Image (cartoon, rainbow, N blue to C red):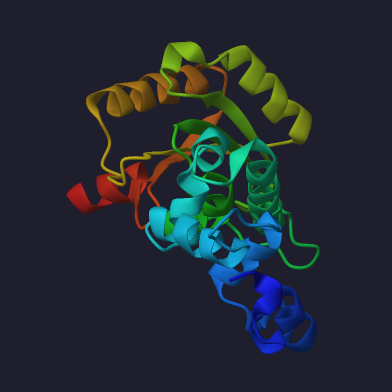
C-alpha cells in the first residue's frame, strides 16, 4: 500500500497540516523527512523501522552516524542527509543561547543541563571549556578537542588568552562519555589535576570538571566536597 492509498487522516503530511507537528509521532515525522518509500514499503514504514533500529528513541537516532542511516534498507545518502540535517537543527536549537535571563553555573547539575544539548547522543568524546565571569555566569563556550583528550593536548596559552579576551575569572571543563558511564577514568583524573595546576600557574581557576552521559553526570568538585 502507498501513502496516498491511506485515509487522509493517516497520511503524515495531511495529518500535520490538520494537527500541527506536535500531533504526529516520531515515526510519522521521520516519514515526512524521508518523503518516499520503496517497493513494498511506504515512507511511514521506513520511518518506523528506522526509529525501531535506533532503540525507539530520538537519543538513539542522534547516536547514529549519517553513514549508519544511509546504510539502512531503502534510505540511502540523500534521504539520510535530510534526517541528519533535521537532527542537527534540533541540536542547534537546544544549544542556542537564550535571549532572556541567563543562569549561573553554580553546581554540576546546572553545568550538565547547560551542556547536554551540545553533547547528547554523540558517538565520540568532545571536550569543551566554559568561560565564566565572577558571578559564575557563562561568557562563552568553546569546543577544544574531539575524539578524546589529555591535558597535554590543550594549549594553555591559547586558553589563557581566550579567558583574558572574554574577561573570564574561572573555567569549567566538560566532556562526554558515549559509553553512558560518567565515572572518570584514570586518564580523566590525571588530566584534570594537571590542567588545574597549569591554569593556576597563569592565574586561572578551574572551577569544575563535569563528565556527561545521556542520563547522568559526574562533577569533580562535588565529589571532592563529599569526601571532606
Q: Nearer the viewer, residue 105 or 37?
A: 37
**Residue 127: horizontal and vertical position, in percent?**
50, 31
Asked if residue 220 lies left or right of residue 84, the reply is left
Q: Position of residue 189 (x, y in %)?
A: 29, 28
Looking at the picture, tell me which residue is in the foreground, 185 or 213: 213
Vertical position of residue 123 compared to residue 79: above or below: above
Q: Position of residue 89 (x, y in %)?
A: 71, 52
Along the horizontal axis of the image, is 16 left or right of 38?
A: right
Residue sitting at x 32%, y 51%: 222
Residue toward you, 145 or 59: 59
The residue under the point 37% across, 27% down is 192
Q: Quadrant of residue 149?
A: top left
Query: Looking at the image, which residue is at 55% across and 50% down?
Result: 115
**Looking at this view, is 31 or 63 the one in front?**
31
196 on left or right of 30:
left
Quadrant for residue 11, please give it: bottom right
Count of numbered marks? 0
* Displayed quadrant of residue 101: bottom right
In which quadrant is the N terminus drawn? bottom right
Asked whether residue 158 is in view, the answer is yes
Q: Position of residue 214 (x, y in %)?
A: 40, 53
Q: Residue at horizontal 31%, vertical 46%?
A: 180
> Can see residue 107?
no
120 is higher (above) or lower (below) than 11? above
Amino acid at each position: 500500500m502507498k501513502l496516498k492509498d491511506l485515509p487522509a487522516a493517516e497520511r503524515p503530511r495531511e495529518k500535520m497540516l490538520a494537527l500541527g507537528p506536535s500531533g504526529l509521532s516520531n515515526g510519522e515525522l521521520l516519514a515526512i523527512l524521508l518523503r518516499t518509500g520503496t517497493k513494498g514499503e511506504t515512507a511511514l514504514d521506513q520511518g518506523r523501522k528506522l526509529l525501531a533500529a535506533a532503540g525507539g528513541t530520538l537519543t538513539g537516532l542522534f547516536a547514529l552516524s549519517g553513514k549508519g542511516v544511509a546504510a539502512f534498507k531503502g534510505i540511502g545518502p540523500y534521504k539520510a542527509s535530510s534526517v541528519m540535517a533535521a537532527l542537527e537543527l534540533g541540536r542547534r536549537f537546544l544549544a542556542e543561547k537564550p535571549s532572556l535571563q541567563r543562569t549561573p553555573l553554580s553546581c554540576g547539575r546546572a553545568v550538565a543541563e547547560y551542556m547536554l544539548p551540545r553533547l547528547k547522543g554523540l558517538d565520540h568524546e568532545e571536550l569543551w571549556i566554559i568561560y565564566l565571569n565572577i558571578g559564575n555566569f557563562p561568557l562563552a563556550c568553546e569546543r577544544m578537542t574531539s575524539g578524546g583528550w589529555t591535558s597535554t593536548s590543550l594549549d594553555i596559552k591559547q586558553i589563557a588568552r581566550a579567558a583574558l579576551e572574554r574577561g573570564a575569572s574561572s573555567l569549567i571543563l566538560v566532556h562526554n562519555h558515549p559509553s553512558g558511564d560518567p565515572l572518570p577514568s584514570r586518564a580523566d583524573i590525571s588530566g584534570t589535576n594537571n590542567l588545574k595546576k597549569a591554569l593556576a600557574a597563569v592565574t586561572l581557576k578551574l572551577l569544575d570538571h563535569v563528565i556527561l552521559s545521556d542520563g547522568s553526570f559526574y562533577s569533580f568538585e562535588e565529589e571532592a566536597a563529599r569526601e571532606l
